Amino acid sequence: MRIGADYYPEHWERERWETDLWMMHECGIRVVRIGEFDWSLYEPSEGDYRFEWMDEILDFMAAHDMKVVLGTPSATPPKWMCDKYGEDLYQKDRRGYARPFGTRKHYCFNSDVYREEIRKLVTLIAGRYGKHPTLEGWQVDNELGWSNTTRCYCEKCRAKFQDYLKAKYSTIENLNRVYGTVFWSEDYNDFSQVIVPVEGACRASDPDGTEGQNPSLVLDFDRFCSDSVISFMNEQADIIRTCSDRPVTTNMLDAGVNSGTGIDYFRMSRTLDFVSWDNYVNFQWGIAEDACVSRDHALLRSYKHQPFWVMEQQAGAIGWTQLGEVPKPGQLRLWTYASIANGADTVVFFRWRSCLFGTEEYWNGILGHDGRKNRRFDEFARTGAEMEKLSRIYGALAPKPKVAIIKSFDSEWSHKIHRHTEGFSYDSLLLDYYRAFYALGVQVEFTAPEEDLTGYSLVLAPALIMVSEAQKGNLAKYVENGGTLLLSFRSGIKSMENTMLPLPIPGVFADLAKIDVEDYDPQYRKETPVSGVFGEGTAKLWCDIITAKGAEVLGVYTGDFYANSPCFTRNLSGKGTVYYLGCDLDAPAMMRLAEYLCRETGVPRPCGAQRGVEIVSTTDGEKEALFLLNHNSHTAVVPLDREYTNCLTDEPARGQIILPPYDVAVLRPE
Ligand SMILES: [Zn+2]
């Protein structure tokens, strides 16, 4: 467990480096990430490769006992290259306009000329630095897919998309049949006619959805674009691995942003040696509640089920043109502990010092523009010292959850294409479930639908709208062997090609749930009261009107024409149990549902859960640690159910522990 910083020595005079490194060591920074935007320094004009400047940086870092993660600079192709290749390199948006030079991420992932240029440069970088003693690892590109750049609608992508479809469907007749192109006279005669889902004439009627495009086409395009980014990343990772044995990662984004990013992070993670992400809690583009950040950490932990890094963690007030609020005293330390508790073993802060120029000149680092020590520096120094102390007691810590939520990128993209009802969002629904368990202090993992579910006491599969036969079989086997599965509305009703199944709802899950949904009521600007084992509550998105066909009724609607109809059922199947919740629930009812499910499945709940206090039970495989994190601006008193030692103060903790605002305790059981 340690902290680091994103550092840009090329932005500063050489004479300053000594001071920076001396200050970094003083506050416990042991690793820096560098170089991820520096193409114009490596190759200022075509073929004129220059490495002396990076030689100097890496040798300087080695001489100053600092480890380095080196980025590949493919997020920012240089001007000469953009001028030379123009539209052979640029992305095109869904209106067909090129995204030109200026800003970043303006390249097409399927540009042959750009990929050739990258291969040449990355081969040289990896060959030169792959075995450098100070090099700890590699970061490919930067925030792949950020700012809606995964989906490119250019001619290059269209041609490769057609190849992708030909490989998938073999004949155009097969594609026409699967897509249902007979609808609106969309039949194709040849794969060369197939479009990418650009903005069409129907946009005004559906600006946030398919814009009227065929939903099977859109989902295939989403998958193709995700695969294109992963292929782009893997090509660089493969080159690196021919010259270097150091691990490779890329910095991912949070689930809220990632819903727009459109990359299947489970698939992306397979070829990475470790995963990392960028954690910004409060900035120009929003404020993340503590449960939301915990959810994002849990996702990152789940992509490879191993320790991860935070590659960029907020270090001050940040934004481009306007700023979010400055982190309050204690919050930077608190956020570091939240990362560590949830499975990060390295937390790298963005950035070391605020830049004097460029798009991010307002983006505050640990140091301000003046480069002096400040209160944030002091907080980092304390945090860094505590990390070193904790590392003498523990190996990498992580929760070992008994509850899992299934996250399917196929389902996510299908729900993005067809949103069902106003206000519905797949990730928000998953967060509703996560938040309920988070509030109880119960840790939750995420899994892909095909992953082994053995070991989980409870698996939640909200709005899992499509599953392959293998995925369905995986869930059925889990239940058959004694697992408890919860399904919800909008589950199992679509094919993997995003067409409706001619089956009674809940489609392929009807045999597991033993219910029939003959009708449903989207809650369009209305809400419906419910009552059940979760107490009283309200559905605000969707109501499946359920008929039990062997299942036991655990909840009913208490309003509208379907009052008294079931909304929540349970079916005993094999050695296991299948719950079906036909509606959404308001937050208090959802929390009571989580309490009920924990009780029924024997999932232990820690003592002391309360609003704004994050409780994380962790282990390093041998020793346990209980993290108590007070996200409140007021003091919290947390009761304890056994005797502990506070690893940060070495004091005994018995009965209760008092946490001042934004304070932290790491408790080792006695
Ligand atoms: Zn393209």
Image (spheres, grey):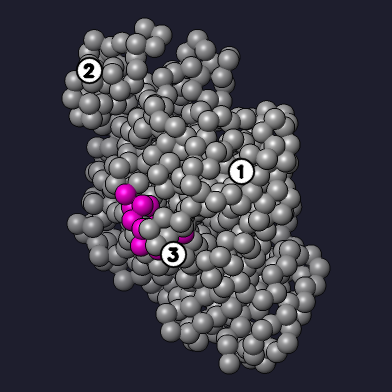
**Dominant SS in magenta:** helix
Task: Give the Cα distance between marks 3 and 2.
Answer: 43 Å
Residue that appears at 24% across and 44% down? 120
Residue 246, position in %: x, y? 30, 65
The residue to which callout 3 is attached is 456
Residue 583 visible to an observer of this rendering: yes
Tell whether circle 1 marks a residue whose Cβ is less than 8 angstroms from ligand 1. no
Secondary element type, mark 3: loop
Residue 90, position in %: x, y? 39, 27
Secondary element type, mark 1: strand
Q: Which stretch did the figure color magenta?
A: 473-484
Amino acid under disc 2: Ile
Which one is in front in this view, the residue at disc 1 or the one at disc 2? 1
The residue to which callout 2 is attached is 172
Task: Give the Cα distance between marks 1 and 2.
Answer: 43 Å
Residue at far top of view: 185
